[in-house]
Amino acid sequence: EVRVVAVGDMFFDRYIRQVADLRGEDFLFSCTKELFKEGDLVVGNLEGPITTESSRSINTLIGSPENYVFTFPTTTASMLKRNGVTAVSLGNNHITNFGVDGLNTTRKYLNDSGVGGFGGIAGDEPVYRVRIKNIPIAFISYNQFGGQSVHDVAQQIKVERLTGNVVIVYAHWGDEYSTSVSYTRPIAQIFADAGANAIIGSHPHIVLPYEYIGSTLVYYSLGNFIFD
């Protein structure tokens, strides 16, 4: 048996960045250490790139364009590793806030720190594969906002299942703050039919219901994990 601790959106800019500057980065994870110890691996959605750029969103007006441009400190990857995060999904609508260069630097910092990364943008969405207790697991990203199509992801799920992997899909989908799953449920059905063992949703920023579609566990949104 392998236990996966899955968390929602993680974010390290704007007010969260100010808190980390004031209290130290590890303060952000101070109430999660016991939770993380329960898992053999910990996975979440990294809602933005790690770059050397200065923050553009700190102290900006809520609703202004700059308020939604994210970059995380270069120490973010080592902070994730130090606090028990195994891998992160990069398939989301903010990962290219600083262009493809920002996506590439994010991967470099994660790789250098020993944190896995999967997903991204169409044509560049690697799968994260890991073997725990002799159980092979593949993490696949579905990024509604610039990733490959639903059917391409379904085909990727089939390929991973054929090689014997347990497949977990991190899906960045739906509408922010909407409780409706009328759009995302048919997508979940396609992924379940393709053989996904579990589907974990993010992007709505609120916790949504979960269900089983056949034997596939579907969390439509885990909501925010570290966010302002």
Image (spheres, rainbow, N blue to C red):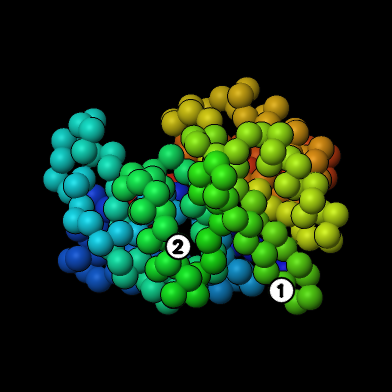
Q: Is residue 27 visible?
A: no
Q: Residues within 10 Å of mark 1 (few under 14, many from 20)?
A: few
Is 87 placed left or right of 212 in the picture? left
Is 215 placed left or right of 44 in the picture? right
Identify the secondary structure beneath mark 1.
strand
Look at the picture and state if 215 lies above or below 134.
above
Q: Residues within 10 Å of mark 2 (few under 14, many from 20)?
A: many
Point 23% across, 33% down: residue: 65
Residue 145's tag is none
Identify the secondary structure beneath mark 2.
helix
Residue wearing tag 1? 132
Q: Nearer the viewer, residue 16 or 94?
A: 94
C-alpha distance separating marks 2 and 1:
22 Å
Q: Which quadrant holds residue 186?
A: top right
Point 29% across, 53% down: residue: 71
Q: Position of residue 152 (x, y in %)?
A: 69, 38
Which amino acid lies under the numbered mark 1 shown in the image of this protein? Ile
Q: Position of residue 51 (x, y in %)?
A: 30, 59
Q: Nearer the viewer, residue 29 or 119?
A: 119
Point 78% across, 70% down: residue: 135
Q: Position of residue 38 (x, y in %)?
A: 60, 71
Q: Quarter holding the N terminus?
A: bottom right
Residue wearing tag 2? 107
Mark 2 vs 1, N-terminal side: 2
